[in-house]
Amino acid sequence: MHVLKYKNYILEFIFFCLLMIIIYFKLELKYLTGILLCFTSIVCIIVRKKNNLYINKKQAGKVLILFGLVYVILLYFIGIFTGFYKSYYPLSINNFFYLIFPLSICIICLEILRSKFLTVSSKINKIFCIIPFILSDYILFASFYNLRVFNDFRDAVFIVVLSSISSNILYNYTSFRFGYKYNIIYRFITTLYQYIIPIIPDIYDIFNSIIRVLYPCIVCYTISSYYEINYVPTIKKNRYKKITFVFLIITILMFLGVVSGKFTYGALVVGSGSMSGVIDKGDVVLYKRVKKSDNIEKGDIIIFKNENNLIVHRIISIKDVNGEMRIYTKGDANELEDEGYRTEDMIVGKVYNKVKYIGIFSIKIRELFERKV
């Protein structure tokens, strides 16, 4: 047993080193596929032991596959409200052989490797073996991010890394108890749809990241609750557990709705001192989205789009020019008014309140990245 344990640790460390080499040299997907195929073959020869799977593995596996289908349906249901965009990777023979096929091989190899690594069932091993699989997700889905740029770093962490941690906890659990085959099917469904279906739900990044983090937790919780062979719940304990879980999800969704800006009310961290005295740098402003039928007046503080940025400034005048409303703005702490004018379609919302200084931490992190660049 000790020999097997150390053998697995060594193989996991070698796998980690291989992935770091791939990241360092920025190797393409075809090279990753070849390396994974070779390494998986070697590991299968060295580690012949198999996990003792649970007797209800088929039922749990079917539920896992069903959850995979529900995940895709859920995304497209949300897309009805948020819209869709054309896939960047339309289904074609070229994309099949250079993207879909090698990605499928990578998923199969990764899940076989996971099942082999998990033949050592210690808690330390289960935690340690997650690390290389998170790295593999980064290579497959986030290697194009420039981690020295704050926005790219933020997206890589929240959209890929956190969701990868959540997903790999689920994959470890289901692979150890029910086998790797169901993981492969689940990952095919939840990953490859975006390379096969011609339209993709246009879901706001923060929504997308929170769904990717929460959904595997829900799946893991559900399967562990109903398919653990030694699971003997007490009614009271189980009830409190479920209430806490539901409350957590509702709280996260409410927070998500506020900060996303996709609903009637939203929140925004102020990143400059152009409104100092009224709204300081690091404050979080609360705003209500503005419709064309809503009245905005001189003196209102509004949020408007300026290229890729959101600006919080005060309206100093409004003019009607040939039926077009032209809105002129200025920061209270600025000497000059903003260049040009704003139109109604540029207005995001009207500020109605603020919370002092709670956004300072995110501002400091952004400034740190900007200094490095």
Image: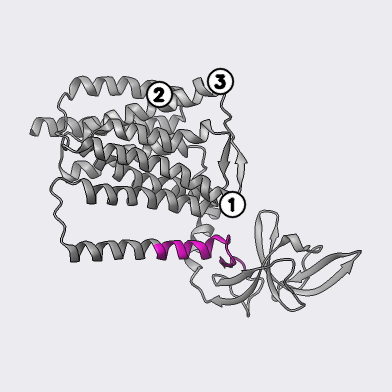
Which residue is nearer to you in this view: 353 or 185? 185
Mark 3 or mark 2, whichever is nearer to me: 3
* Amino acid found under the numbered disc labelled 2: Thr
Residue indicated by mark 1? 82
C-alpha separation, residue under disc 3 versus residue under disc 2:
17 Å
Q: Residue at point 24% right, 35% down?
A: 58
Is residue 262 shown left or right of residue 250? right
Q: Is residue 78 above or below residue 99?
A: below
Residue 251 at x, y percent in the picture: 41, 66
To which residue does mark 2 refer? 33
Return the x and y of residue 10 as percentages of the image width and height: 21, 31
Q: Give percent across and percent down for residue 104.
A: 41, 27
User: The magenta stretch spans which residues?
Assistant: 250-272
Question: Was residue 20 drawn as part of the magenta stretch in this picture?
Answer: no
Q: Is residue 270 magenta?
A: yes
Q: Earlier in the sequence, mark 1 or mark 3?
A: 1
The residue positioned 22% from the left and 33% from the top of the image is: 117
